[in-house]
Amino acid sequence: MNETDLHFFIDSTMNYFEEITNQKASAGIPYIKDEAPVVLEYTGIIGISGKRKGSIYITANEAMLSEIANIILGIDKLGKEDIKDLVGEIANTISGNVRQAYGSDFMISVPVVVEGQARDIKLPDNIQSFVVPLTWRDHKSFLVVCLE
Amino acid sequence: MSEKIQTGENQEEKHTNPASSDHPSGDDKSIILQTVEEGVFFLNSDFEIEPEYSSAFVDIVDQEVNPGQKFLDLLSHRVPENIINNLIEYLNLLFREDLDNETLDEINPLSKVEFHYENRWGLWTSSKFLSFRFRRLMNQAKIERLVCTVKDITQTESLTKKIEEIEETTNKQMDWLVNILRIAPPLLKEFIDVSETELDQIDTELKNFTSSNDCRPLLNKVIKSLHQLMNNASLLNLSIFSEKLLNFENEVQNLRDRENLNGSDFVPAVIQLGEVRQMLKDIKALMQRFKHYSNTLRPTRRYEGGLLIRTIENLVKNLSRQLDKKINFDAAHFDHAIIPYSHQQIFREFLIILVRFSIFYGIETPDERKSNNKDPVGLLQIETFSDRRICGFKLRHDGRLVRIERLLQKTIDSVETQSLRDHPLGSSQLGSEVVRLLFMPSLATPTLTEAEYIKEIFGEMEMVKKKLKMHRGRIKITFTSENFCEYTISLPIS
């Protein structure tokens, strides 16, 4: 993965937050993912294949997702399924935007959502993964990009 | 999963079929489809998969195949969308009688396609190259259906790809080999271990950084670590690695010079870090591959010793030029062969750091020396010594310790060393105090123009001190303020 790829994903994520919530998120310093798990309460994963291979995921806590859902849908109380849909949708939008830039050779899977603090999300072993810490309002979340 | 082989014909039909002697019966077809190594399946004019298909077909596509399933659905998410769009057009052409097979073969979008496999979550796991071929089955001059074959051509394809990759990496690996084969394996191993620890440190710093903090201390730490790594790489003459580290350091330095940094700004540096990590991994793998050869290919001790002397000579020459000093370097009594294998790296480090320190702060410029009635050309000597228990080296120069004295004075004046003022040092104690000062990085004074450099050297000294302690070694300094200074480093042999 090169600089441009990672920038694409970060910019796409930042744009998502700004467009959807009218409020900018800030990206922390990216780092190389080690064995330590990077998983919060809800995780939306997108598999990438085609000319580039790997996967990306965004992981966030319920509080943050509820606030975003509240902005989008105007609903205060959300069910688990709605929250799961939302995190899947965020992951889908981010990779969908990146796909527009890379063309149809860049294939993305349907989002997979993991609920609860899983031990870790399995990523391809032979590809370096980068973790981008995100802060939106006071909420922490992480974008993890693993791309060949 | 559906049954893999389904002929859809009953026994009676087969026996009464007049063509049964010329064409395979249902059972025969079933056996053929079970044993054939190629994936075989049939498509009707609606591009649906017919109930008869070979088991190899299911194995190759690695997913459930349902009779009547649209072929295009089977390919969805497995091959890129543009190929699927071309395929729709192509399948339509296959049902046109006016087009010949040869032409159709030429435009087959699936003649070689990368097929992607997913896990149960739909996430990519692996890819294979597949080759599909389509033939038309006629019935009364009309195309009734298509017989399709699919082969896994990954091995052929990956072989071609591998050859390209090997060609691409051979030069790189040759350079590495030239670099690493002349280095003693324990030294290289130590270098890799130290580098990995240092990179882990950088990773941890980046990971634990919170945006509310000022980035500069973090970046300074990273630069310091990188500098340390670069020095280590230079000691081993690992030029490829030090060049890579230099690029990385430049990226970090660019960041340090910028205002209002955000996480995105760190991307180039983090990518460089990833590349350095990958390079270490590759060197490690290469080292593993050549583990058995390294002992025989390793240069002689004499050659290694010569290499070290040349490194020091170059260092003396370059620094002298840089600082307008004139220095004679004498290594006539330095015998590299007496240094045990396990101590070589630490001896190299000590030598280089002390040489740099002596040239920077000890040996004066020709004018300064002349005004002190000294030979304008300074002298720097190194020699080794050993007995049954210890081995070591001495580094002696005929310069002054003017800066050390200054630093010592500053220390005595500082609050931190209040106790020193309260208990003035006797001349015999001065040597050990200088040693202590050499290894205290925090003593660098920001008012000096070379403050950063001092800090760096002192940082190196601090690390060497730790290593010395680790190896149960000792350092002793003897000097007179005007005439000479001699550092003696000794380490136990066992």
Image (cartoon, grey):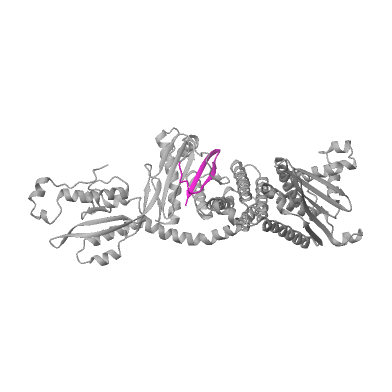
* Relative image position of residue B320 (x, y in whole percent): 78, 61
* Relative image position of residue B323 (x, y in whole percent): 79, 60
Magenta stretch: helix, strand or loop mostly: strand
Span of residues in magenta: A122-148
Quadrant of the rendering where the C terminus of chain B is positioned: top right
| Residue situated in front as seen by the camera: B397 or B264 | B397
Extreme residue in the front direction? B388
Does B361 appear above or below B422? below
Quadrant of the rendering where the N terminus of chain B is positioned: top left
* Relative image position of residue B301 (x, y in whole percent): 67, 55
> Magenta stretch: residue A146 in it?
yes
In the picture, measured across the screen, residue B286 lies left or right of residue A88, that is: right
| Residue situated in front as seen by the camera: B159 or B294 | B294
| Residue situated in front as seen by the camera: A26 or B463 | B463
**Tally of numbered discs:** 0
* Relative image position of residue B3 (x, y in whole percent): 23, 43
Does B318 appear above or below B207? below
Quadrant hosting residue B363: bottom right
In the picture, measured across the screen, residue B160 lies left or right of residue B104, that is: right
Residue B50 appears anywhere in the view: no
> Magenta stretch: residue B212 in it?
no
Residue B482 appears anywhere in the view: yes
| Residue situated in front as seen by the camera: B15 or B263 | B15
Residue at horizontal 32 percent and vertical 47 percent from the top: B62
Quadrant hosting residue B81: bottom left
